[in-house]
Image: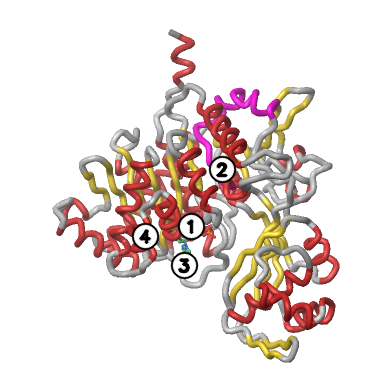
Amino acid sequence: MEIADWEKRYDEAVSTVKEQLGNVQGVFVAYNSNVDAMKHIRESDIKKLISIVGCREIHARISQYPREIKDPVDFMARLIIAMRDGKAAEVPTYTTDIHDWLMDNLVFDSARMGGQAGIISNLLATIGVKNIITYVPWLAREQAEYFVDSPNLWHPVLENGTLVLKHPKEAYNPDQKPKINWILEFSKGLKFGCAGEEYVVPRDNRLIISSRPKWIRIDMMPEMYEQLSDIREDIDGAILAGYQMIKEEYEDGTTYRDYVEHAVNVIERLKGCNPLMRIHVEFTSIQNKVIRKALLTDIVKKHVTSLGLDTVEVANALNVLGHEELAYSVINKGEDSIVSLYEGAVRLLKELELQRVHIHSLGYYICVAAKDHPLSVDDQRQALLFASALAATQATLGSIRDIDDISVGLEVPVYDQGYEDLIELEKYLVRRGICSAEDFEDGCISVYDHDLIIVPSKVVNDPVATVGIGDAISAGAFIALLAKMPKINECKITEVA
Ligand code: ADP
């Protein structure tokens, strides 16, 4: 199919999905929301911070390369390393002390909703999906402020032991402290000196100080969990993210196994006896391999229907599942990395017993679906195209105000390079006799035990913001599929019978 034909498919997909969005009864979204405090570091800021903390201390700490931020010296060491190398980095901090220190000595320029579940909840509420039931285990007043003022957005609360739904701004826990991540951006060319060394930032980048205070738990209180079945009728599916915050061990003696078990229980409660309840997990990078593996083999496998991830995350997932070679060739950026990506997606689909795996990359999306997925490949393709237009809208505008904004994303042209990458995949599949060039034409290929759906995506040349685009892609495709899903509630059928 020529690029111009893809553009036509885009138009059809967006207008169809827009009309169908009202079919979605609702979605449950959990767990991770936080506040992102943004600060652009200027020369005067870095000089001031160096003079407060002291050059000699910072210099000594730089050589120790702190892996977590325990005090202002650790913070300054990692900031200077990131600025010196011009590299993006994310470093955890396990107390809220550094936040207080930064508020006293730096102050942020702006703040916004952060965290996959928070970003997705706001996006889905904004595009008008009926019931968005968001759940944040640590809903502080400051956190609640960053949820959009939308009448279709709810958070569960317990009132006299009964679960009720309220807007997050009316549902927060006044005793809860907020989880605030700091995003410190710096620009190429910024100059500063410390302990006799002169530094010049080689390229624009950012350091994220990610807040992981010890009260952070990916969990739900038992009374709320017990009544989760009461909201089942209001939703067609769930999007779950944030499992990367599970720790191996906690100070109170609990371990990751406890939280993995609770996570599975929540999923099973949400599903109840509805076989069409779709559960999507949005994967992310997880440094700790024990947790990464537990998420895949103990939470995702058997319990979840859909998995969303980017290319690096595919490699990370394959790695802990024992496919090191394939993982390496996915990230190798060689000619056949797209082929390895496809093979990797099939491995994940099979080994994790999923219904669909959706991979987003700059320029194209690949989805592999099980043969018994209730929707056709055409529906799956429309979902991907809708997701791409939504992502392009977000990249162009920074944030989406309502579903009609999607016309902005539709205007963005299909990315040439992504289109070329698909041709590479086509050559491979034809060479291996998996499909003919004609089969490949419209991006939907039926292979003997799965379906492959691939689309070239729309890429914005000069994006206003890139944070959360991956979340918009996965949530957009998943919601489009829910909108197309037949409505069968087995619990009801059984009751009637
Ligand atoms: P994040 O979690 O910050 O969203 P991910 O790596 O999960 O990051 O997702 C980033 C995705 O966003 C890429 O895979 C790509 O498909 C998409 N993307 C990145 N930049 C652009 C852009 N300028 N225009 C459209 N899509 C983009």
Q: Is residue 227 visible?
A: yes
Query: Whole-Å distance between the Cαs marked 2 and 3?
Result: 24 Å
Looking at the picture, does residue 265 appear above or below residue 199? above
Q: Amino acid type of disc 3? A: Val
Residue at 79% over, 40% down: 173
Please provide percent x and percent y for residue 230: 61, 23
Q: Which residues are magenta?
A: 222-242
Q: Earlier in the sequence, mark 1 or mark 4?
A: 4
Q: How far apart are the two marked residues, 4 and 2, measured between alpha carbons?
A: 26 Å
In the image, residue 453 lies at what x, y percent? Answer: 31, 49
Q: Residue 186, image x and y in percent?
A: 65, 77
* Residue 126 in sight: no
| Distance of label 1 from label 4 (alpha carbons) | 12 Å
Please give the residue where the numbered disc 1 appears in the rendered image. Answer: 391
Mark 3 CB lies closer than 8 A to ligand 1: yes
Residue bearing the label numbered 3? 460
Q: Which secondary structure lies at badge 4?
A: strand
Q: Secondary structure at mark 2?
A: loop
Estimate how packed mark 4 is, as few (under 14), some (14 to 19) or many (20 or more) residues with alpha carbons within 10 Å.
many
Which is in the foreground here, disc 3 or disc 4? Answer: 4
Residue position marked by numbered label 4 in the rendering = 364
CB under 8 Å between callouts 4 and 2?
Answer: no
Circle nearer the N terminus (1, 3): 1
Q: Amino acid at mark 1?
A: Ala
Q: Nearer the viewer, residue 197 or 483?
A: 197
Asked whether 228 falls inside the magenta stretch, the response is yes
- Whether the residue carrying mark 1 lies under 8 Å from ligand 1 is answered with yes
Q: Residues within 10 Å of mark 2 (few under 14, many from 20)?
A: some
